[in-house]
Image (tube, rainbow, N blue to C red):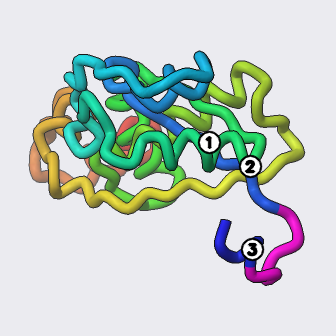
Amino acid sequence: MEFHRLGIIEKLPQMIAVQAEKSDAVKRAFESGGELQAVSGETVADSISVSMPRDGMAAVMAIRDSHGFAVSVTDAEILAAIPAVARGSNVFAEPAAAATYAGLKKAAAEGKIKENESAVLLISGNGLKDVASAMKSAGKPFIINPDMGELRKLVADNKLA
């Protein structure tokens, strides 16, 4: 928003708030047009797990001023986003950071982001902050003999992706 105010960019980008479903006070306030109300704040994405965001109304105003919107995602969607982000961008994201991708997918599926539009995701949290969640999302490890032939077969069958 500052770049727009300074004249560096002509068009203000839409701000899209992505929150965990059980920690979505900003989304609720934005959609209701009311004040922030405390929520449970319980989510696998502990970096965004807060019952009452400190700057929540500033976030609501940024969404409104940019003609944006808010979306909430489930813990299952967040966990599924961790390996998807890694596969698509080679970034190991922690759950709160991966929530942005889960939100993008949901917004696109709902038609809020069109196929011809661009989006920038802020993925600032490293997956090493929460390895346990990454392990949950990765599934069972492959166990093979120390044999290049077996490894080549896994790779060729695309089972490692």
Q: Main secondary structure of the magenta part?
A: loop
Q: Amino acid at mark 2?
A: Ser
| Residue for point 53% across, 51% down | 88
Residue matched to label 1: 16
Disc 2 to disc 1, C-alpha distance = 9 Å
Quadrant location, the C terminus: top left
Residue 66 visible at all: yes
Residue matched to label 3: 5
N-term mark: 1 or 3? 3
Instruction: Determine if the magenta segment contains residue 75.
Output: no
Q: How far across and down, in percent of the image, does residue 135 sit?
A: 17, 37
Residue 122 is left or right of residue 39, and the answer is right
Foreground residue, 46 or 66?
Answer: 66
Q: Which mark is residue 66?
A: 2
When asked about the image quadrant of residue 70, the answer is: top right
Residue 76 visible at all: no
Foreground residue, 43 or 29?
Answer: 29
Callout 1: helix, strand or loop? strand
Classify mark 1: residues with Cα within 10 Å, few (<14), some (14-19) or many (20+): many
Classify mark 2: residues with Cα within 10 Å, few (<14), some (14-19) or many (20+): some
In the figure, 8 relative to 113: above or below?
A: below
Disc 3 to disc 2, C-alpha distance = 12 Å
Q: How far across and down, in percent of the image, does residue 92 sit?
A: 33, 56
